[in-house]
């Protein structure tokens, strides 16, 4: 699957995914197009870049 923010691979592993142990600030979801919300995972690179701000 592709990240809805950068369109790169998101390395989604579903139930064992890296993202289950991460905190996603709610503001990051404002960067996701409406038609992609809850359909594809944000990648770790985009999450890390967002948290650096």
Image (cartoon, helix red, strand yellow):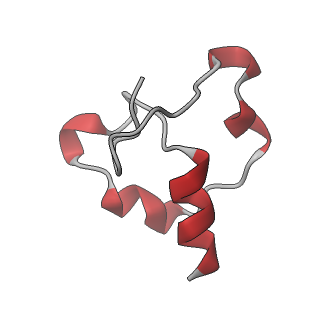
In this image, 18 relative to 10: left or right? right
Q: Residue at x 23, y 48 (%)?
A: 33
Q: Residue furthest bottom?
A: 53
Q: Vertical placement of 17 versus 21: above or below?
A: above
Quadrant (top left/top right/bottom left/bottom right) for the C terminus: bottom right
Q: Residue furthest front?
A: 8
User: x and y percent of residue 39 in the render?
Assistant: 36, 27
In this image, 43 relative to 23: left or right? left
Quadrant (top left/top right/bottom left/bottom right) for the N terminus: top left
Q: Residue at x 41, y 56 (%)?
A: 29
Q: Residue furthest right?
A: 21
User: x and y percent of residue 25 in the render?
Assistant: 58, 64
Q: Vertical placement of 4 versus 1: above or below?
A: below
User: x and y percent of residue 19 in the render?
Assistant: 68, 38
User: x and y percent of residue 12 in the render?
Assistant: 58, 25
Q: Vertical placement of 51 versus 15: above or below?
A: below
Q: How many marks?
A: 0
Depth check: 8 or 36 in front?
8
In this image, 46 relative to 7: left or right? right
Q: Residue at x 74, y 48 (%)?
A: 22
């Amino acid at each position: 699957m592709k990240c809805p923010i950068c369109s790169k691979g998101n390395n989604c592993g579903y139930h064992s995914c890296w993202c289950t142990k991460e905190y996603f600030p709610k503001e990051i979801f404002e960067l996701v197009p409406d038609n992609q919300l809850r359909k594809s995972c944000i990648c770790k690179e985009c999450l890390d870049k967002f948290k650096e701000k």
